[in-house]
């Protein structure tokens, strides 16, 4: 009886081992089938954004296209409004300093007057549409910025526009009038002053734009100091060179009279000193942030 019980027990163990072997042999195909199904489901799912929630590149390109179309539409609307108001009224404002001196304008080509009017009206349209242009630029860049960077970028954008307009206004009102009077006075005894309209507008634009760029100096230095690229010690070392360069630029861009040169060089020197103060302030701010 004991032998029969041992034999039955061995038979039962053999059956259990055989069943486990069959189960182990059947498991991998089931796992492979499940993995294949998972891979198929993954391939059928649409592409998702990454873990940071960033939009695909094509969405950025589409958004940029929409922003550019809005900018073009804003410029076109402003251009149409100015054309409705009348290009001649705008040209009267542009040519007023010359007419006060008793100088007449001439044009050499048949289409010169029309070309100059369209050029002036277009520049004025861009200036009028600049708030919309800046807002579209800000709306495109804003999602990629941190909250602190958003505040700084928005403030710097409008401050940059304000400084540029201030510099252009200063150059036109304060410096250009005296330069024009000097040119007319010097040439009056030599020849009859008859100015070509297209050359006058080109000279006016080339004369006042450098003032707008120079007035951006404090803001540009502040941004470089914020990034850690520029230091106040570097600006202090180059102070003498900057003063000399300001007078050299003033001599090149203004008529050869002392008053015009000083009127352009002094604001540049003053803006350079303001830039040094702005860089120092940025350095103190960075030192406080690092100490906290």
Image (spheres, rainbow, N blue to C red):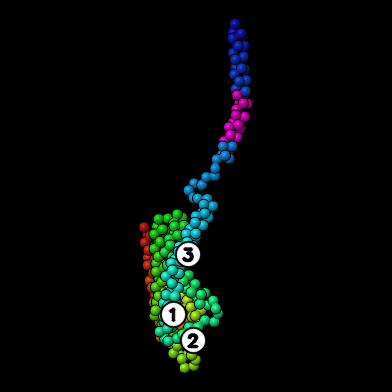
Q: How many other residues sit within 10 Å of disc 3, few (<14), some (14-19) or many (≥20)?
A: some
Percent of width and height locating residue 52 = 48, 48
Residue at the location (41% across, 71% down)?
Answer: 165
Residue at the location (41% across, 58% down)?
Answer: 150
Query: Does the stretch in magenta take in 31?
Result: yes
Which residues are the magenta region?
23-38
Write down the residue under mark 3: 76
Percent of width and height locating residue 194 = 49, 86
User: Does dot 1 land on a helix, a strand or a loop?
Assistant: helix
Write down the residue under mark 2: 194
Horizontally, residue 5 falls left or right of residue 90, namely: right
Q: Nearer the viewer, residue 196 or 38?
A: 196
- Cα gap from disc 2 to disc 1, whole angstroms: 13 Å
Write down the residue under mark 1: 95
Q: Is residue 291 above or below residue 18?
A: below
Image mark count: 3
Residue 160 picture quarter? bottom left
Q: Is residue 203 above or below residue 63?
A: below
Q: Nearer the viewer, residue 239 or 146?
A: 146
Task: Compare marks 2 and 1 and give the one earlier in the sequence.
Answer: 1
Task: Compare marks 3 and 2 and give the one earlier in the sequence.
Answer: 3
Task: Compare marks 1 and 3 and give the one earlier in the sequence.
Answer: 3
Query: Does the stretch in magenta take in 86?
Result: no
Q: How many other residues sit within 10 Å of disc 1, few (<14), some (14-19) or many (≥20)?
A: some
């Amino acid at each position: 009886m004991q032998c029969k019980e041992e034999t039955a027990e061995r038979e039962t163990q053999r059956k259990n081992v055989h069943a486990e072997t069959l189960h182990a042999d059947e498991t991998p195909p089931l796992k492979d089938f499940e993995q294949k199904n998972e891979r198929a489901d993954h391939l059928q799912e649409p592409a998702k954004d990454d873990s940071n929630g960033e939009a695909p590149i094509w969405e950025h390109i589409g958004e940029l296209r929409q922003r550019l179309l809005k900018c073009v539409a804003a410029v076109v609307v402003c251009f149409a409004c100015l054309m409705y108001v009348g290009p001649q009224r705008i040209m009267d404002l542009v040519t007023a300093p010359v007419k006060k001196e008793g100088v007449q304008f001439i044009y050499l080509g048949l289409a010169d007057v029309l070309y100059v009017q369209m050029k002036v009206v277009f520049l004025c349209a861009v200036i009028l549409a600049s708030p919309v242009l800046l807002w579209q630029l800000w709306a495109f860049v804003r999602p990629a910025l941190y909250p602190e960077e958003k505040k700084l970028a928005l403030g710097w954008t409008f401050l940059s526009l304000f400084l540029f307009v201030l510099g252009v206004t200063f150059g036109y009102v304060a410096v250009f009038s005296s330069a024009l009077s000097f040119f007319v006075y010097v040439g009056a005894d030599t020849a009859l002053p008859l100015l070509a309209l297209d050359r006058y507008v080109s000279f006016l634009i080339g004369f006042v734009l450098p003032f707008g760029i120079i007035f951006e100096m404090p803001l540009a230095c502040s941004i470089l100091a914020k990034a850690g690229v520029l230091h106040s010690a570097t600006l202090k070392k180059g102070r003498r060179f900057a003063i000399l360069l300001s007078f050299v630029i003033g001599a090149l861009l203004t008529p050869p009279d002392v008053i015009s040169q000083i009127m352009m060089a002094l604001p540049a020197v003053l803006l350079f000193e303001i830039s040094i103060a702005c860089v120092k302030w940025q350095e103190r701010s960075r030192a406080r942030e690092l100490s906290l």
